[in-house]
Amino acid sequence: MTDWLYSDIVKDHFTNPRNVLFEDEASFDADARGQTGNIKCGDQMLMLLQIKDDVIRDVRWKTYGCASAIASTSMLSEIIKGMNIQEAYSIKPEDLVEKLGGLPEYKIHCSVLGDKALRAAIDNYLEKTGRAGMLKEESTEICHCLGITDKDIESAFHNGARTWEALQQATKIGTVCGGCKSKALELLHEFAHIYGID
Ligand code: FES
């Protein structure tokens, strides 16, 4: 048998995921709801939060994602309990990958599902409390099927993605209808120009 690719922490969170929503949504009295991903490519994530005085008190989540998405969202759900929404909003997939003791390179894009759903839920909460868009970074959605923005592409670029294939590996962009390809390639080109990298 080949070596197991995942760390013990990933295995633990995958086989025993924390804060999963097993019942239907109504069983968890959520103050906020965030959903991301696209069921057509098998990745979908729902996150529900209970929030009091801008502090996340409890969380439930559910996904049709893979082992890496499950482990990273389980870890995320542990970290954010007791955290202020502002701090939670700024958690990056890299933080989760580090806490999980690493993920195989080609699985890193799976870890973005949880934090995207978390930000969607916090945005939902801010909207409900009359502060719509307060924490939102200015970004433009490039891939409408998967909700991937120019910021996501920029961050993939900074992590070494220089080609369409590398960008797809990092973000899964273009894996549903493919209609975003030319715009995404234009952006990669633009970032190479801005940052002076070929
Ligand atoms: S817009 Fe459909 S895959 Fe990107």
Image: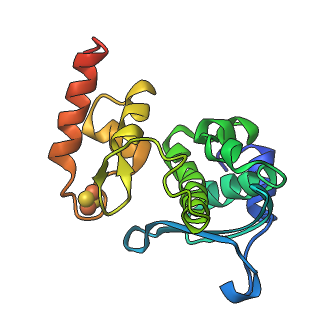
Horizontal and vertical percent for residue 196? Answer: 27, 11
The quarter of the picture where the C terminus appears is top left
Is residue 80 positioned above or below 46 on the image?
A: above
**In the current view of this chain or complex, which residue is farthest to the front?**
130
Q: Is residue 109 left or right of residue 25?
A: left
Q: Is residue 104 left or right of residue 177?
A: right
The residue depicted at 70 percent of the width and 56 percent of the height is 71
Horizontal and vertical percent for residue 103? Answer: 63, 41
* Quadrant assignment, res 191: top left
Q: Nearer the viewer, residue 16 or 143?
A: 143
How many numbered badges does the structure rendering display?
Answer: 0
Horizontal and vertical percent for residue 193? Answer: 22, 17
The residue depicted at 76 percent of the width and 81 percent of the height is 28
Is residue 52 positioned above or below 148 on the image?
A: below
Q: Is residue 4 visible?
A: no
Ligand number 1: quarter of image:
bottom left
The residue depicted at 35 percent of the width and 37 percent of the height is 166
* Quadrant assignment, res 92: top right
Is residue 134 positioned above or below 53 on the image?
A: above
Q: Is residue 148 visible?
A: yes
Q: Is residue 70 left or right of residue 169?
A: right
Horizontal and vertical percent for residue 112? Answer: 54, 50
Q: Nearer the viewer, residue 39 or 92?
A: 92
Q: Nearer the viewer, residue 4 or 24?
A: 24
The residue depicted at 31 percent of the width and 58 percent of the height is 175
Which color mode does the image show?
rainbow
